[in-house]
Amino acid sequence: MAYDAEPGGDPRGPWCPKCRLPVKKGDPSTKMHFDHDPDGSKGLSGLWHGECARPYWDTITPALEKLKKWSGGF
Ligand SMILES: [Zn+2]
């Protein structure tokens, strides 16, 4: 079993790359995907806390634009 080869397969659960704390079940979270880190090997792509991911929304996939609108904000 190689945890490294399995993004999100950490037995402790997903960890937020931004603040290095676990993303607990029920926490607001966002699945982030960076083009230069497609498989998460650089520790960027993966599950982030919603608030941790917010500053990056402008820099990543256009799909997240929809999320912004849905969240009724700005
Ligand atoms: Zn975080």
Image: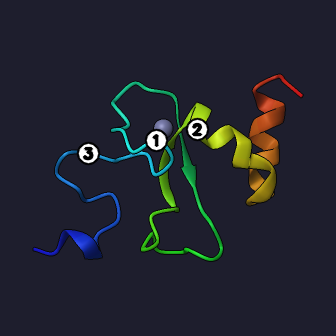
Neighbour tally class for label 2: few under 14, some 14-19, many 20 plus, Cα within 10 Å? some
Residue 22, given in percent of the width and then of the height, sits at 33, 38
Q: Is mark 2 within 8 Å of ligand 1?
A: yes
In this rendering, the label closer to the viewer, 1 or 3: 1
Disc 3 designates what residue? Answer: 13
- Please tell me how many numbered marks the rendered image carries: 3
Rendered view: 50 above or below 40 = above
Image coordinates of residue 66 in percent, x first then y, are 80, 43
Examine the rendered structure and indicate whether residue 60 appears above or below residue 36: above
Q: Which mark is residue 19?
A: 1
Q: Are marks 3 and 2 in contact (CB under 8 Å)?
A: no
Residue 52 marker: 2
Upstream in sequence: badge 3 or badge 2? 3
The local secondary structure at tag 3 comes to loop
Q: Quadrant of residue 53?
A: top right
Left or right: 44 in relation to 51: left
Say whether disc 2 or disc 1 marks the residue closer to the N-terminus: 1
Position of the C terminus, as image quadrant, is top right
The Cα–Cα distance between marks 1 and 3, rounded to whole angstroms, is 15 Å
Between marks 2 and 1 in the image, the one whose residue lies nearer the viewer: 1
**Mark 3 residue CB less than 8 A from any atom of ligand 1:** no
Question: Mark 3 against mark 2, which lies toward the viewer?
Answer: 2
Residue 42 vs residue 33, the one in the foreground: 42
The amino acid type found where label 3 is placed reads: Gly
Viewer-proximal residue among 69 and 17: 17
